[in-house]
Structure formats: structure tokens, C-alpha cells
Amino acid sequence: MNSRKFILVTGGASCGKSGFAEKMASSIHEDVTYVATAAVLDDEMERKVERHRLMRPKHWKTVEETINLDKVLLEYGNKSEVVLIDCLTLWISNQYFNSNEYSTEVSWSEREDHILDNVKKLVEIAAKVPATTIIVSNEVSMGLVPENPLGRAFRNSAGKANQLAAEFADEVYLIVAGIPLGIKA
């Protein structure tokens, strides 16, 4: 096994964070498990997922998981050299709308508490497994204040999740206009 690390890569939409994380994963070891969290619900997302598939090396293992990331990281973090999770923000979104998890009476605040518990569990695992774990996440806190309660709840959850991940991470990179800025080393 390599000398393990937990690395967080964050930045705005379409800023180059996935490409940076993929190059970093390749530079660490050829044994990479790529964990995709996107739920493909429309043509635009399908095209985006396909573009990402074509960019990845063919020999990487790909696991698609929209909800149970902790279980996937426990499994592959103990048998792969590098686990790349792309992305934390989509995973949070998936949890907000997981009808198996929440009844319609559950408030956004209660959902956020549960989601942040899941994030904490995930980043604690990322900090302990033998594999180097790279987690990609969107930095959503720099935009406009969303006009609806759901948008604000999601933005708040994503911001708090990034703070939790950064706290546990060994390294944190903010990608701006395709340029990586090391903000924790």
C-alpha cells in the first residue's frame, strides 16, 4: 500500500476539479477505484457522465453508488491503493431526495443533521483506510443566496460538509479557473 492520505479537492462548477483529482490519483498509483455518485436523471447528466467516463483510464475500477458511500469506501479503501470519490455534493443531493430514507414530514433541518452525520462517518473512514482517498466536492458557498428554502438548506449542508471534510483531510485543494491552490498541506 502507498502512504495513505485523505485529500479534498473543491471548487466551483466546471472549474477543473475532477480533472485535477483524476491526474492526482494517476500520479499516486495505477490501482485506482473511481466512485461515481451521480444519479443520471436527464440527458445533460448522461452526457456529462459519459464525458467523465471517456476521460478516465480504462484500467480503473468504477463503482457507481448514490447513497451508501461509507460501505463502498470501507470495501475499496481496504483493497485499492487509491479511491477517488466524485463527488460529495451530488451525494448530499442524493440523500436529500432519498425517498427510502425520509418521509415527507421530515424537515430540511432534520435531513441536514442526518446527512452531516453521514458525511462525518465518511470522512472518518477516509482518514483511516489504508488507501489514499481523494474526495471531490463543489464549493457552493461563494454564489448568490438561493431564493428558496431547499436551495438554502442544500447550500448550508454542502458548506458544512466541506468544512467537515477539510477538518479530517491531510490536504485540501481549491481549484479556481483550472488552477489548483493548495490551502491545507
Image (cartoon, rainbow, N blue to C red):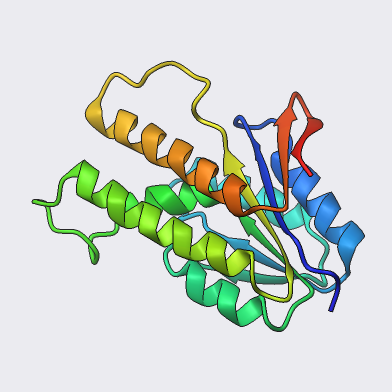
Q: Residue at x 76, y 55 (%)?
A: 54
Extreme residue toward the right, this view: 27
Residue 16: image location, x then y, percent: 74, 36
Q: Is residue 59 above or below residue 75?
A: above
| The N terminus lies in quadrant | bottom right
Residue 142: image location, x then y, percent: 53, 21
Residue 92: image location, x then y, percent: 42, 50
Q: Is residue 140 above or below residue 5?
A: above
Residue 117, picture quadrant = bottom left
| The C terminus lies in quadrant | top right
Residue 101 visible in the snapshot: yes
Q: Nearer the viewer, residue 106 or 161?
A: 161
Residue 21: image location, x then y, percent: 76, 49
Q: Is residue 32 above or below residue 143?
A: below
Residue 17, picture quadrant = top right
Q: Residue at x 77, y 44 (%)?
A: 19
Extreme residue toward the left, this view: 105
Q: Residue at x 60, y 54 (%)?
A: 168
Residue 97 visible in the snapshot: no
Would residue 45 appear left or right of 110 to someone viewing this image? right
Q: Nearer the viewer, residue 5 or 101?
A: 5
Q: Is residue 75 above or below residue 91?
A: below
Q: Nearer the viewer, residue 174 or 38?
A: 174
Would residue 158 appear left or right of 1 to someone viewing this image? left
